[in-house]
Image (cartoon, helix red, strand yellow):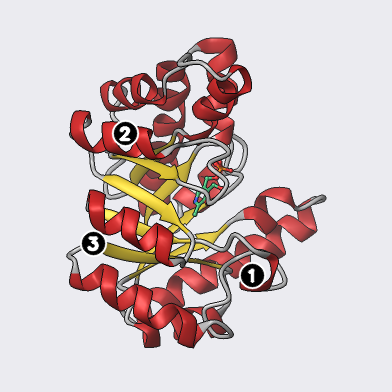
Amino acid sequence: MSGDLRLGVNIDHVATIRNARGGAHPDPLRAAQVAAQAGADGITAHLREDRRHIGDGDIARLRAEIDLPLNLEMAATEEMLAVALRHAPHAACIVPEKREERTTEGGLDAKGGFDHLAPFVARLGDAGIRVSLFIEPDPVQLDAAKALGAPVVELHTGAYCDATGAAERLVQLDRVRRAAAHAEAIGLECHAGHGLTYGTVEAVAAISTIRELNIGHFLIGEAIFGGLEAAILRMRLLMGEARAAAKG
Ligand code: PXP
């Protein structure tokens, strides 16, 4: 672990490459094993409604064969709820899949979708699955997540990572910082993810109230050039160094 900051490795895009040919290679389960060896704290996988990357069989194999906690990213649908209840992952992160479920920037609209989301948060929680909501770093969305009874939020770092220009990036980083502080103030555990790279991870890792980062696409991309284990080890190193430096 990077001190008190966990790393969840998202293996979706190993399945994207596999599915491009329709066969069994490369196997996301093998990626999860490598991630475990490299010191990941958890595996994250998003079972999409269209199964464009991870499939149902992958989820079953991850649960049966990988000891690390599984964080299942899922839309708030009856179909996905049934999958989650069947496989009982350690955690479920509710994400938007359809445009109308999103805020303007791309996180889940916890406030606008409150009535729809409430029973999903409750039923997952009742089953002992730790629920997080993938939301924009926006206090309105954080307050809605709290009111929904979710114990965890995952802050969408896409606007920060995609910012063009240093000034805009600082504005977006400040949003993440303030949201992480607000999460702590209202008693929510705070995670973050989407779009993180070697170049963007340190500033987020330095935010002491963020407890977990979920990173996928960049790591799988880097794995093409230097191997998955090396990519994860380097990411962990950067996370750990940034966290230690922030503590002073
Ligand atoms: N967290 C959540 C909730 C996600 O949906 C994703 C995938 O989009 C990630 C983290 C990982 O994002 P990325 O693949 O860009 O690292």
Q: Quadrant of the N terminus?
A: top left
Q: Is residue 248 left or right of residue 115?
A: left
**Camera sees residue 92:** yes
Q: Is residue 100 left or right of residue 70?
A: right
Please state the horizontal and vertical placement of residue 230, each as a whole percent of the image. 44, 17
Task: Classify 10 Å Cα crowding around label 2: few (below 14), some (14-19), many (20 and above).
Answer: many
Residue beneath disc 3: 129
Residue 44 is labelled as: none
Please give the name of the residue rendered at 44% of the width and 78% of the height, measured from the top-left corner: 117
Between the residue at mark 2 and the residue at mark 1, the CA separation in whole angstroms equals 29 Å
Residue beneath disc 2: 40
- Looking at the rendered structure, the kind of residue marked 2 is Ala
Between the residue at mark 3 and the residue at mark 1, the CA separation in whole angstroms equals 23 Å
**How many numbered markers are drawn?**
3
Please state the horizontal and vertical placement of residue 29, each as a whole percent of the image. 34, 25
- Looking at the rendered structure, the kind of residue marked 1 is Arg
Residue beneath disc 1: 102
- Looking at the rendered structure, the kind of residue marked 3 is Ile
Q: Is residue 181 left or right of residue 226?
A: left
- Asked where in the image residue 99 lies, by quadrant, the reply is bottom right
- Say whether disc 2 or disc 1 marks the residue closer to the N-terminus: 2
Between the residue at mark 2 and the residue at mark 3, the CA separation in whole angstroms equals 20 Å
Q: 13 or 105, which lies in front?
A: 13
